Image: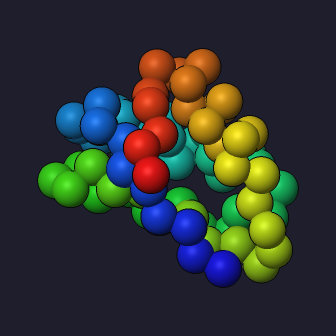
Amino acid sequence: MTFKFTVPEISCDHCKSTIINTLSSVDNIELVEVNIETKDVTLNSSEEIDLDLVKSLLDEQGYTVVS
């Protein structure tokens, strides 16, 4: 399964690293890709992902998830 969303606050490699490190710890997420230029985040998983958990974890880091 692939989930894609936009995070408007992404602006640099530090943002990218923070998002990857934060989301890599979530169960069922196998791959986290962050595109700094388009501000897109793509998640690959073997099963359904709790998107509310993803939003909450990113919010704690100062990032907003936009569908």
User: Picture coordinates of residue 55 (x, y %)?
Assistant: 61, 37
Q: Would you place residue 27 above or below residue 60 in this image?
A: below
65 with respect to 27 (left or right): left
The quarter in which the N terminus is drawn is: bottom right
The quadrant in which residue 64 appears is top left
Q: Residue at x 56, y 32 (%)?
A: 58
> Total label count?
0
Furthest residue toward front: 67
Furthest residue toward left: 37
The quadrant in which residue 35 appears is bottom left
Q: Would you place residue 37 above or below residue 60 in this image?
A: below
Q: Residue at x 75, y 60 (%)?
A: 49
User: Picture coordinates of residue 18 (x, y %)?
Assistant: 48, 35
Query: Depth check: 65 or 27 in front?
Result: 65
The colour scheme of the drawn protein is: rainbow
10 with respect to 41 (left or right): left
2 with respect to 49 (left or right): left
Query: Depth check: 66 or 56 in front?
Result: 66
User: Picture coordinates of residue 51 (x, y %)?
Assistant: 69, 50
Q: Would you place residue 57 above or below residue 33 in this image?
A: above
Q: Would you place residue 42 above or below residue 65 in this image?
A: below
44 with respect to 35 (left or right): right
